[in-house]
Image (tube, helix red, strand yellow):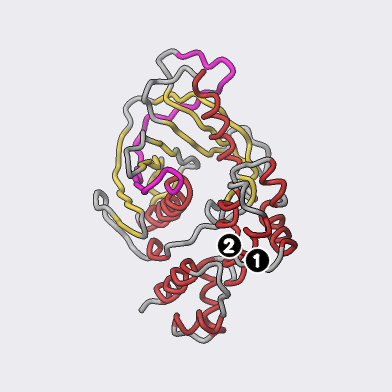
Amino acid sequence: MYAWEAIQKTLDYMEERISENQEINGLAAIAALSPFYYQRLFSRLVKKPVREYIRYRRLANACEALSCKENRILDVALEWGFGSHEGFTRAFKEAYGMTPEQYRDHPVRLNQFIKPDLSLSNTMIDEGVPLISDGLILEINRRTLEQPIMFIGLSNYAPIDGQMPLGEATGVDVPGEVWRQFHERKGSINRLPAGRELGVAFMGDAPSGNFTYFAGAEALPDADPGEFKIWQLPDREYVVFGFEAESFEELVTSALYKALNYSDLWLKKHGMINMLYVPELYYESTPGASYMELWIPADKQQQG
């Protein structure tokens, strides 16, 4: 068994019992490691100490439970392994910058620490060969865009800290809030009927320590943006990472996190470098599945 497989085994075990008490000695025994080396290896591969990881995964589940206002906050805290209302509030505020009461009164999208799939860091696939891993179906191809595609929508600045890396940061999900606002207003946008939607992070004119995030839909020809913003997907060759998940919520959280991580690994293995923006193209969902693509404008890395 590889080292990452031993840690993944405990990640799967913890996820099934995330609200229960987790003893380091027991987890180490599952991984067939001493407690010292287990914790050391876990922190290296998961990028969080064991206890902190468990706390963040419990908080992710608690956030979902809080969305139902019939659930008392104390009951949510106890259900997901927090010993008291005070301890839950302290952990929640440390992670998200607000109390559970504030979140419930003014709900916003939050970034969550995603359960990792370590196999994605240790498996290489060829172009055109699907990879199936922990509910994710991923396929890589190259495409050349002959004409730029214009998208119309909304944008906002987002702080790099608290947003990146995706799936490992906690706090208010600023790109998610841009999407929420876009979907509230897209009925008044001059968009192509049944066209694709796009989200993209790029620097633009963002102030230091921030990036710009745009969310929009394919625009009608010669559309007048009015109060909205325009972003063009440039004509060039792209490495396209297409992936499918069972639901849209899973698609834009855990599946997107895994696909982004895998794309970085794949590009490095092929001597390529990402050119500073990664458009996310969303397609109309079909029953039982949601599909999207990362169009990465990657070039061969120059030998120095």
Depth check, front residue: 241 or 245? 245
Q: Residues within 10 Å of mark 1 (few under 14, many from 20)?
A: many
- Image point 41% across, 63% down: which residue? 121
Relative to residue 54, is residue 275 drawn left or right?
left
Q: Residue type at mark 1? A: Phe
Residue 224 location (% of width, % of height): 50, 13
Q: Which residues are magenta?
A: 223-250
In reply to whether residue 248 is colored magenta, the answer given is: yes
Res 302 seen here: no
Above or below, 271 against 49 in this view is: above
Secondary structure at numbered mark 1: loop
Relative to residue 27, is residue 91 drawn left or right?
right
Relative to residue 155, is residue 298 drawn left or right?
left
Residue contact between numbered discs 1 and 2, judged by CB atoms under 8 Å: yes
Residue 81 location (% of width, % of height): 61, 67
- Image point 57% across, 34% down: which residue? 178
Residue 106 location (% of width, % of height): 68, 40
Res 218 seen here: yes
Residue at numbered disc 1: 82
Q: Residue type at mark 2? A: Arg
Residue at numbered disc 2: 58
In which image quadrant can residue 25 be found? Answer: bottom right
Taking the view exactly as shown, the residue that stands out farthest to the front is 70
